[in-house]
Amino acid sequence: MSFPVTRPRRLRRTEAIRSLARETRLSTHGFIYPMFVCPGKNVRNPIVSMPGVAQQSVDTFLEECREVEQLGIPGIILFGIPEKKDATGTEAYAADGVVQRAIEAVRRAKLNLLVMTDVCLCEYTDHGHCGIVENGEVKNDPTLELLAAEALSHARAGADIIAPSDMMDGRVGAIRKALDGGGFQDIAIMSYAAKYCSGFYGPFRDAADSAPQFGDRRGYQMDPANAREALREVELDLAEGADMIMVKPALAYLDIIQRVREAFSVPIGAYNVSGEYTMVKAASANGWIEEKRIALEILTAIHRAGASIILTYHAKDAARWLKNG
Ligand code: PBG
């Protein structure tokens, strides 16, 4: 049936009809807010390239956690800036590391927040790579043990969900084994399964002070030109025991989110990364775009593509906007 019998505009006539016909509803219930914790007391170092985001000491961080909880955001993902970095990222798996202390603080405060932790070495190593470096090469297998130790220390501190972002082969299996061995068989893993080697992580590397000191991450993160490979990565992570998977970045990878959604039944998260956030902030600061409208449109598109969980620096803003209609 075609025009004039069919008129798609009938369902766009009023907000009430549009709302009834709406296919996708963005909700605060799927948001995860990324946060950066650093040593010290009463510290708040704003990240210049990410307006609204800061490195914070545990006390200051805890105050923001209360705000996140009050906004109805279900959880946070934690990144740590260590006291000092070394070749093997020792602070990543130290019982008194900054992330471990932050998790314990959230637990002690009895906040109603899911605590997800990023498991990786790049924030903790002096060379800034996500694994052990030998002769200028990032070594896969020796790294697994350290990642497993890091995940286990996060679980001991009280983390709910472990999110490995390093892209070493076999890390999900190694982490699952370590968690189970430590009595944490009920702690879930959300793997950064399809993580691309992306320029959109630029501002994050200011925030986490984690830029590689030589070379780049092409030897372990995925080539932006590949899509089928993402399905293979997801399949492998699920076979190793991942409970949920993530696609990252989000905005330039909506096709990947959709393909993964169609091929697998597990919950899918998408990371609306630092560069995506920064572009919106910078353009809106210039008055060139409308922040609220654009940010909600982007988040809706990520959700529409198939991600039920969205990790986003816009979580607090978006929660407010959604609350106020
Ligand atoms: C750690 C990690 C990165 C991000 C999340 N975990 C940086 C990277 O891989 O270089 C990026 C997040 C963002 O850009 O917001 N490996």
Image (cartoon, helix red, strand yellow):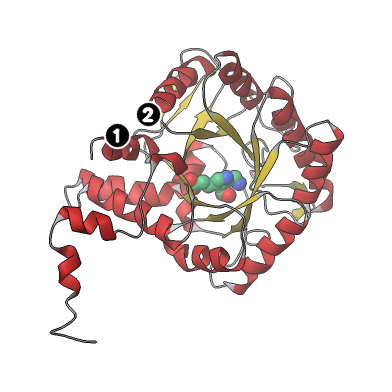
What is the crowding at mark 2: few (fewer than 14 residues within 10 Å), some, or many (at least 20)? some
Of the numbered discs in the image, which one, if any, rests on residue 167?
none
Q: Amino acid at mark 2?
A: Leu
Do callouts 1 and 2 mark residues in contact (Cβ within 8 Å)? yes
- Assess mark 2: CB under 8 A from ligand 1? no
Q: CA distance from mark 1 to mark 2?
A: 7 Å
Residue 239 image position (x, y, % from top left): 76, 58
Residue 297 image position (x, y, % from top left): 30, 54
For the N terminus, the quadrant is bottom left
Q: Amino acid at mark 1?
A: Arg
Residue tagged 1: 320
Q: Residue at x 27, y 38 (%)?
A: 321
Side of 319 relative to 249 (left or right): left
- Assess mark 1: CB under 8 A from ligand 1? no
Q: Nearer the viewer, residue 165 or 40?
A: 165
Side of 54 relative to 229 (left or right): left
